[in-house]
Image (tube, grey):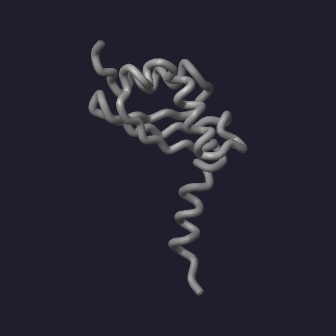
């Protein structure tokens, strides 16, 4: 069984859950994914990761050896740059 490409990992995740955005980088064995999904609303980081592992199913055990991920809701993604800008321009 060949190692999956980052684009294949993106497709596996997209097939298993509704995502607004997925970006995966990796070398075939170790991956880093940024996943934005409304399905994460109200879920803890651990629950979000479990949703992604469930979407990947058996591939997680058999093909993907390490997956780091950043899981965000669309609102969290929208708030991220604004929060960074507010922190940078905030003076006491």
Q: Quadrant of the N terminus?
A: top left
**Does 59 sit above or below residue 33?**
above
**Does 60 sit above or below residue 67?**
above
Q: Residue at x 62, y 50 (%)?
A: 76
The number of callouts visible is 0
The image quadrant of residue 41 is: top right
Q: Where residue 27 appears, x then y in whole percent?
A: 27, 32
As rendered, which of 11 and 31 lies closer to the eye? 31
The image quadrant of residue 7 is: top left
Q: Residue at x 54, y 18 (%)?
A: 15
**Does 47 sit above or below residue 3?**
below
Q: Where residue 72 appears, x then y in whole percent?
A: 58, 44
The residue at the far top in this view is 1
Q: Is residue 1 left or right of residue 74?
A: left
The image quadrant of residue 81 is: bottom right
Q: Where residue 87 appears, x then y in whole percent?
A: 55, 71
**Does 11 sit above or below residue 25?**
above
């Amino acid at each position: 069984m060949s190692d999956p490409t980052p684009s294949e990992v993106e497709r596996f995740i997209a097939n298993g859950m509704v995502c607004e955005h997925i970006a995966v980088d990796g070398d075939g064995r170790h991956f880093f994914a940024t996943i934005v999904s409304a399905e994460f609303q109200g879920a803890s980081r651990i629950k979000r990761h479990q949703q992604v592992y469930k979407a990947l199913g058996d591939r997680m055990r058999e093909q993907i050896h390490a997956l780091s991920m950043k899981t965000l809701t669309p609102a969290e993604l929208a708030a991220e740059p604004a929060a960074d800008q507010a922190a940078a321009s905030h003076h006491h």
